Image (tube, rainbow, N blue to C red):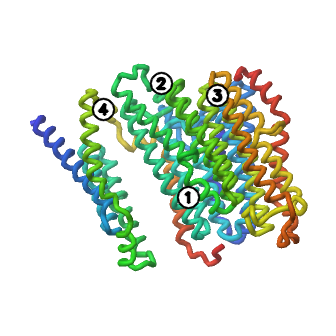
Amino acid sequence: MDLRGGICMESIIYVTLVFLLVFCVMAVVSNSIIKSAIYLALSSAMLGVIMYVLGAHWAAVFEVSVCSGLVTVIFISAISLSKMKRDEMDKLYENKKRLSFLPAALIIGGVLLTVAAFAKDFRLPAAAAAVSEDFREILWTTRQVDILGQITAILAGGIALVVLFQNDEQKK
Amino acid sequence: MNYLNYAAEAFILIPLAAVILNNILPKKFMEDHFHILSGAAALLQMAAAAYIFCIMDINRMRHYSFFILWEKSTSDSGYFSVGPVALVFLFCIGMVTFVSVMIAIRTVDTKKISYVNLLMTLLIGMNGMVLVNDLFSLYVFLDIVGISSFVMIALYQSRKGLEGSIKYLVISELASIFMITGLAFIFMKTGSLSYNAVSGVLPADISDPQTILIYVSVILMIAGFAIKTGVVPFHSWLPDAHQSADTSISVLLSGIVIKIAGVYGFIVLTGLFKGVRAIQISLAVLGMTSIVVGALLALRQDHFKRIVAYSSVSQMGYILLGLSTGSVLGLIGAVAHVFSHAAFKSTLFTNAAALHEQTGTLEINEMGGLQSRMPVTALSSVVAFLSTAGIPPFAGFWSKLLIIMALWTTGNRVLAGCALCASILTSAYFLRLQKKVFFGPLPEHLSSVVEIKGSIKFIEILLTAVTTVVGLLFPLILVYLQSRGWI
């Protein structure tokens, strides 16, 4: 049962990884800025699934809610708020040089890396020991510095939004 | 020890308190007195750094660890710590922040509240980077520095400012991606990113395939820090960002941000992977290329701030050369050059602010003969130029001398010779700048120009005095370092 469960989990990870890669490539090569934002959200969602399957539940929740949800909302809001008309923007975006060689480059690169890894008998180091303590406990007791850093990062982000979006009546 | 703890906590808590005060006090009052709050925060930082240095020296302490707000942690990632190198950086941060505030009194006419908010978050970010003991925490504070700098460049939302800030943001995020990927590889190997855990993680056996992973992470981190430092070939963002930002912000970027976000990262990296030849060679190649290419590019510029920005690219090369030696003398030379560069580059940007305020332009071809109209600005500019070129007795001479001595004593004699010769290039672009701006005939349209007054003039005099006095007293600093067994 465990063996079947393990194989099932591995299958989910590999299938999701393929989808993740496909959505990432689509986000880069797409001709529409809205579609690019949506593909980016989908790739984040796939990453969230991988994190969940690997047991990083909190990280998965943050990845899906913030990177896949909030960031996409911000992207689409910014596109909507832009004074440029949608079709003009799409046209401008369409005319940009696309990385059409990206999928081929990724496939060739992936194959070369796999061959090199087999030739060198390369194995990734075993993942760090699974953490048995509560995530919140660790954050609070051993990562105080990062909490302080995150508070400041949020503060800086808030100030940035105020500065960039406030009505500047007295433009320099 | 209590006072020592209060002083150490001040590095984070004072800027945080300044942000809160800036937003709760009446807007009109803060707009009129914004320089008092932010200037006081900068001066307190310098005082705290000097006080901690003295106490640590008296008690022969190499490091002092402290906590902020929370109770003690068992992990070494959970606390801050300061040492002599960190204190020099913290002092420089305070000094350049003070200079920025003094320039801002004249140049920042609107958005004063936003300026103080961003300046203080930038201060927390830079202080945090210097104080942490963990690579991930370093990354967190590095991002705060990135966010604050990006918005500061775009403060006035001018087209040039936005263009410069977008360039900075995109390239800065690229650096962040390199760094976080590198950190992930190291974490896979060690299970922790605290400096103690990562130190010595590179095994001697290079044939071990897993070692490749650590080397890849080191390469990624070198690339990330090189982008943040603005060294060649990762320099494309730097002149645009520095030129397009307000001068009070350019002085911060060139005077301290690139040093904290980039050079300090290199210091951490060389400390963690001591004696790794590949890192030393990479830093030497980056440093030498940067010195020469930065100087050659500076020669081709016609905008005062662009010349000074390219000069920063070149001078960062000297700091990397010092670090590439892997010796204590090289580290001391690099840190000394961080200080002297902070002083003379701040002077040059203050000169830029003075010239822009009085003449309305920074195009050097539109200027000339200003030494008769602006003698204080001209004198301070000449002193800063002499210090940059490494002419005695100014501060820049001693720091460059230490770097060249470190290169010579570690067997890198060709590099030492090249670094020495490259000073001629520094002299070349600054002589051109001085000649075009301050000497020659005075153009008709500048005949009514007068010397700048107030805070900018005060800062020009102060920084010139700092560059000269530190240069004159440097032999005493060397005697002190020798007495402590550091050189």
Mark 2 vs 4: CB contact within 8 A: no
Mark 1, residue position: B150
Q: Residues within 10 Å of mark 1 (few under 14, many from 20)?
A: many
* Residue at 34% from the left image edge and 58% from the top image edge: A99
User: Do pointers 3 and 4 mark residues of a single chain?
Assistant: no
Mark 2, residue position: B200
Mark 4, residue position: A124
As measured in the structure, the alpha-carbon distance from the residue carrying label 2 to the one carrying label 4 is 19 Å
Q: Residues within 10 Å of mark 3 (few under 14, many from 20)?
A: few
Mark 3, residue position: B414
As measured in the structure, the alpha-carbon distance from the residue carrying label 3 to the one carrying label 4 is 40 Å
Q: Secondary structure at mark 1?
A: helix
* Residue at 89% from the left image edge and 63% from the top image edge: B373
Please name the amino acid that badge 3 sits on: Val
User: Do pointers 1 and 3 mark residues of a single chain?
Assistant: yes
**Chain holding disc 2:** B
* Residue B345 pos. (x, y %): 72, 49
**Chain holding disc 3:** B
Nearer mark to the viewer, of 1 and 3: 3
As measured in the structure, the alpha-carbon distance from the residue carrying label 4 to the one carrying label 1 is 36 Å
* Residue B226 pos. (x, y %): 54, 43
* Residue B14 pos. (x, y %): 66, 50
Q: Secondary structure at mark 3?
A: helix
Please name the amino acid that badge 1 sits on: Phe
Q: Secondary structure at mark 2?
A: loop
**Chain holding disc 4:** A
Side of B117 relative to B32 (left or right)? left
User: Do pointers 2 and 3 mark residues of a single chain?
Assistant: yes
